[in-house]
Amino acid sequence: QSQRLTSREMAVWWAVLGLLAACVASAAKESVLNVCMDAKHHKTKPGPEGALHGQCALWKDNACCTAETSTGAHQDQSYLYNFNWNHCGVMPEMCKRHFIQDTCLYECSPNLGPWIDQADTSWRRERILNVPLCKEDCELWWEACKDAVTCKENWHKGWNWTSGTNQCPHSSTCQLFKYIFPRPADLCEKIWSNSYKYTTEHWGSGRCIQMWFDPANGNPNVAVAKYYAQNGRDASPAPQAVLLLLPAALLSLL
């Protein structure tokens, strides 16, 4: 015949369960920090890369990209994805700088772990989703590109690849960015299938990922990733839910 636990024994059980849940939550938080996604050109683990090229040099102290990848990020129709920035005429250099920086962040940053998600494509197993980009990054990107020209809102899919590089679909027409992306949020969120999320958070707030920063002052995205990891940005069940479910299961055995 089963015996009921005393109030003291129940208190001990609660303490043990609380400690277990805390350990599980802590491990889950740490697992998304300082990681590289499983994608086409990423390293398996981040580390120093002293020779990163150009704009990607911001990540040279700890990077998910190699020097070769960082060079490719600066080239038109590079080996990385054979993507043609100039599909509707030559992209202005000021606009291209932001797309290069976007590529460097994606390829090199080890601080995107809280937003890594499964991908449904043949060329990568993981992607980023809804990374909270700082207000300044989105607005400067849009301002630099508003008079550039493109034919598509979502650059992840729908291109004509019959030539080996991306060309505009036959049904599309080339238009100014500011018509296809009327607001900075439209550009940041739509161009890469919600890889980024527009926020009203500012540089230095510790609440948004910075595409641009001064490496002499350290990488601000380390603290941002840690903040979001600690606030439940991973896909694991919340620790509170574990605490609610486990005692009920135990009580059913008494």
Image: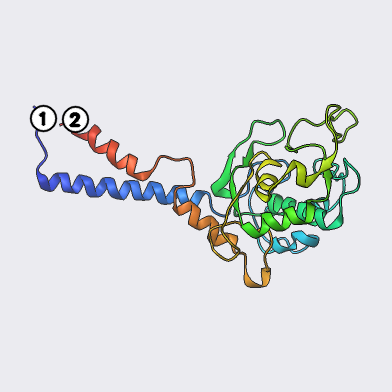
Q: Is residue 22 left or right of residue 144?
A: left
Is 254 located above or below residue 65 in the figure? above
Q: Quadrant of the N terminus?
A: top left
Residue 142 position, x and y percent, is 73, 53
Callout 2 crowding tier (Cα within 10 Å): few <14, some 14–19, many ≥20: few
User: Would residue 146 be seen by someone viewing this image from the given angle?
Assistant: yes
Closer-to-camera residue (125/102): 102
Residue shown at the point (80%, 41%) measured from the top left: 81
Q: Give the CA separation, mark 2 to mark 1.
A: 8 Å
Labelled pair 2, 1 in contact (Cβ < 8 Å):
yes
Q: Nearer the viewer, mark 2 or mark 1?
A: 2
- Relative image position of residue 10 (x, y in whole percent): 16, 44
Mark 1: which secondary structure?
loop
* Quadrant placement of the C terminus: top left
The residue under label 1 is 2
The amino acid pointed to by label 1 is Ser
Q: Amino acid at mark 2?
A: Leu
Q: Which residue is under mark 2?
A: 253
> Left or right of 53: which side holds 205?
left
Query: Within 10 Å of the Cα at label 1, are there few (<14), some (14-19), or many (20+) other Cα atoms?
Result: few
Depth order, front residue of 95/186: 186
Q: Secondary structure at mark 2?
A: loop
